Image (tube, coloured by chain):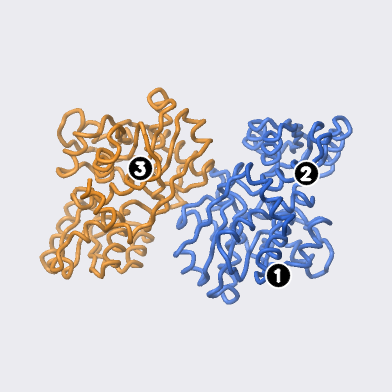
Chain colours: A blue, B orange
Amino acid sequence: MQDLVAIYKRVQPFIHKTPIIHSRLLDEATSANVYLKCESFQKTGSFKIRGATNAILSLSESQRSKGVVTHSSGNFAQALSLAAKNSGVKAYIVMPSSAPEIKRKAVLGYDGIVTICEPTLVAREQTSAKIQQKTGATFLHPSNDLDVIKGQGTACYELLQEEQNFDYIIAPVGGGGLIAGTCLFANAFSSNTIVIGAEPFAVDDAYRSLQSRKIESNETTNTIADGLKTQLGNHNFPIILKSVQQIIRVTEEEITAAMRFVWERMKVTIEPSSAVAVAAVFKEKNLFQNKKVGIIISGGNVDVTKLPF
Amino acid sequence: MQDLVAIYKRVQPFIHKTPIIHSRLLDEATSANVYLKCESFQKTGSFKIRGATNAILSLSESQRSKGVVTHSSGNFAQALSLAAKNSGVKAYIVMPSSAPEIKRKAVLGYDGIVTICEPTLVAREQTSAKIQQKTGATFLHPSNDLDVIKGQGTACYELLQEEQNFDYIIAPVGGGGLIAGTCLFANAFSSNTIVIGAEPFAVDDAYRSLQSRKIESNETTNTIADGLKTQLGNHNFPIILKSVQQIIRVTEEEITAAMRFVWERMKVTIEPSSAVAVAAVFKEKNLFQNKKVGIIISGGNVDVTKLPF
């Protein structure tokens, strides 16, 4: 517990304490008592700045002087760039050529050093490895790194600081960093709270991993929840296996409907990956009826010209 | 001043104290120091609940027992229904047959008694008059009523309670209730603050009214800002004429761009009428450079299936 509080205090100066939104409309629609921890309002538009900041602050002086490297086309690219900039560290970001121009510009805006590669995992890993060799930069994985995982959990810590006695906390599951971090803090500071994951049916690798007790992957990744396509890793899977009670799967239609509800009725722009967790509460009405439920809204980065409704 | 504080205290139990959002991104993009008073998070999704509540609380016992009536297809219909329900008063709402099903349902959800009429101003007024005759209900105008106007101004009061020394406060101008109320409170509690209106070029009746010093109307109303199509009234125009320094006009493209900025970058769902006021700050960079600017974000009621981007 002391370790986790120390991590939060270290990360705190670099992040927003995001608002927790409670809505009568959502409560009525779900028959539950729901609190949204809105990381959509976080710096860079997602929770990823928390983990990126903690990972950079965990490096030695000598490591920091050589910079950090990651491959990401999504939220972690921006987050690592800003976290590195905040600490005067160089951030080398490998992005696939398929990444939208707007995301590349955002990374450049935070002084990230962008290298473009072919849009395959092999190319991304090879390009990162080359940069590591050349610069001595430390590779930071977006979700499968214990310092990243602990940093992501600080969103849950802020939620528990403001609201107590949750029956459930739900987080979306992509690479597993957010939910693993959520487990660590929930277990430490609210031991009666059950952590549940939410995942699209289309990429239900984590659901299958909990069943088979080994890390499964997705053969196709045909979901609107673009942040949840990746698979779990060896650092976060043991935590998830131990502490996540179940993973609720939702359809693409349920994701879109939940996203629309939050946009139209609650006036908050959330990304599809976050809507997955909201959809889980709408779906499992019996489980959540009259329960106090916290949801980690992971982010709000959406291209509004490409909406599903 | 005491009168205005008393109004706020009376309305306060029935409304949300909405958040004020300050964003480094918006400041950088506008070169100003901008604070958004987000009535998008208000009950019923707009500031209108403030004026509706104050108007109902200003009625006599005997008036209340007979109910209230208005004609509106927009935010005031929902607001009056909820405000009336909160005080145990009947609300008769005249809606044009062209009003979207979702708005009619929202009114019914607040126990409003809906009468559908032809979608013309004459039909709306005649239908309201008939209901008045039959029931003895008091007609409440959405914007041209002094109690409504004073109630709307309480959004500005909350803004000034939390943040001081505004150089400018900007509000969108439709029927004139919001900006007139804003003037009353700004003059009383922040006399050095200049109030500015914002309006689409397509419905610039208030701009022309300030020039001609009489109430002008619009021949066409071809704007995305559906809340700003109406004209000023004899109760709010004298206040606006006395206290609004200028009205900034913006194009439809500027409205859409401002709306997209707030949705994508700030993650708040605002309606086009509110984006008009944000667009004004983007447009008049010289005027607002390094100034402290408050914007009343009037609401967030948007059909997300009909977006301009």
In depth, the one of A179 and B135 nearer the eye is: A179
How far from the left and from the top, in percent, is residue B196?
A: 30, 33
Residue indicated by mark 1: A246
Corner quadrant of residue B49: bottom left
Q: Which amino acid does label 3 sit on?
A: Leu
The residue mark sitting in front, 1 or 2, is 2
In the image shown, does B100 or A247 lie closer to the viewer?
Answer: A247
Tag 3 near tag 2, CB within 8 Å: no
Residue A221 shows up from this direction? no
What is the spatial separation of the Cα atoms under label 3 and label 2, in whole angstroms?
A: 42 Å
Q: Is mark 2 on a helix, strand or loop?
A: loop
- From the viewer's perspective, tell me whether residue B228 is left or right of residue B263: left
What kind of element bears circle 1?
strand
Precedes in sequence: disc 1 or disc 2 = 2
Residue flagged by tag 1: what amino acid is it? Answer: Gln
* Residue ID for mark 2: A58
In this picture, residue A307 sits left or right of residue A190: left
State which chain disc 1 sits on. A
Question: Who's the residue at 36% across and 45% down the image?
Answer: B161
**Label 3: which residue?**
B160
Disc 2 chain ID:
A
**Which residue appears farthest toward the top when viewing the image?**
B286
Q: Toward which corner of the image does residue A84 lie, by quadrant?
A: top right
Question: Label 1: how many residues lie within 10 Å, few (<14), some (14-19) or many (20+)?
Answer: some
Q: Nearer the viewer, residue A168 or B105?
A: A168
